[in-house]
Image (cartoon, rainbow, N blue to C red):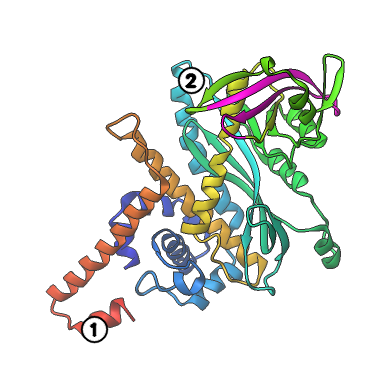
Amino acid sequence: MLEAIVQNHERLGKFLNSFRDAFKNHPQYRHFQVYVIALMIYLGSRNLAGLSQVIPGSKSASSLYRFVASMDWDTEQVEQIRWELLNRRTRRVLQAAKRRGKPIPVFLIIDDTLVEKSGKQMEGVDYHYSHSAGRTILGHVWVTGHLVVLGQSYPVSWKLYRRRGMCEELGLPFASKPELAASILRSFHPLPNTQTYVLTDSWYPSQDLLDLCEECGYHLISAVKSDRKLKTAGHNLQVKQWAQCLPKRAFGFVTVNTICYKLWATTGHLSSGHSVRMVVNRVIGQKTWRFLISTDTSLTPQTIISYYLVRWEVENFYRLAKQSLGWGDYQMRDLFAIERHVQLMMVAHAYLELERQEAMAVADETDTRITIGDIQRQHQALSRRTEIAQVFDLTQRGFQLETIYQRLAA
């Protein structure tokens, strides 16, 4: 069945074969094929028990666990190949855009997500506060870097965050979320002839991160907390105080993505000394003010808001990864196995994103919207057709129903 799925989709086979040299033997490579395909096509919970049942004739859940927990395959090479495949297409798109003379901003989104778990024996789990749930939740927190450029969207790095108390208990070095974000920025290699904009929420724009962005030649566009101070025109006020003390006539209106914003913008200095453009804004009809800063002071307020809204791409990725690719389903205790599971999920996402880009490139309508979910459903349908075709072939060759059961549904 595995061979039939790969043979029926040439690009899938070619993609998986790109990783062949990262595995020491054919059984390891076959496990890799099964794992990645199962993450994409399975409709149930993508834990090891579920993944092992997806492809008839594949290995048991215990075999898949040994594959991620103890088999000696090269995780660094897998990640290098994943990045090269994505980066190759990105560079081609950038070259095409460059020939048209268009400016090319690149967005590197830094964010974190909580993956809820029920097993207290899982390595690395702890209680973390969830803003969406309004309470503490047991799980893993992953800090990620996510790249968005010319319609392409994919993760570049991910790191597990542990609270200081857990690190002290285990004798491990502690790294805060901003420090993990800084390590992601340092490992990122900017694309040629582009300007990288780092997008974050209000948790991340520390002085160290601002210094690092300046050192690397990146611009930072970030939300800031309401008590962050900005000095301009001889006044040094919290950003919320600027919103409160300004007269109504000081505010203007802009529309971004069909949504109207009321805003006021100015250029000043943070207490860290960094020069920024601040945009005080709120959506018309809402009462909550938001405060954005940009170290690229040449941008208009409308552009700053539109760039910052790109940050929601990472939320779309989190939702897809947890609901449809198995980030929320793993149940292994060993952190090494968990990290490999996440890496294989990232490989599956890379393939689907490349296929989405290919489908967009050949679409008849220029404004056609194709999602990764659309591509995933196509492959799920293809796998079902392949299984039906195998049943039909075995029937035509005279095999009895019980024999077909044993081959395909054992």
Mark 1 Cα-neighbour bin, 10 Å: few <14, some 14–19, many ≥20: few
Residue marked by disc 1: 403
Location of mark 2 (residue) = 98
Mark earlier in primary sequence (1, 2): 2
Label 2: how many Cα within 10 Å (few below 14, some 14–19, many 20+): some
Q: Where residue 272 appears, x then y in whole percent?
A: 85, 29
**Rendered location of residue 239, percent (x, y):** 77, 29
Residue 132 relative to residue 126: left or right = left
Can residue 191 be seen here? The reply is no
Mark 2 residue element: helix
Residue at the extreme bottom: 402
The amino acid beneath tag 1 is Thr
User: Is 345 drawn above or below residue 410 in the view shown?
Assistant: above
Secondary structure at numbered mark 1: helix
Part of the protein shown in magenta: 260-286
Q: Residue at x 43, y 54 (%)?
A: 16
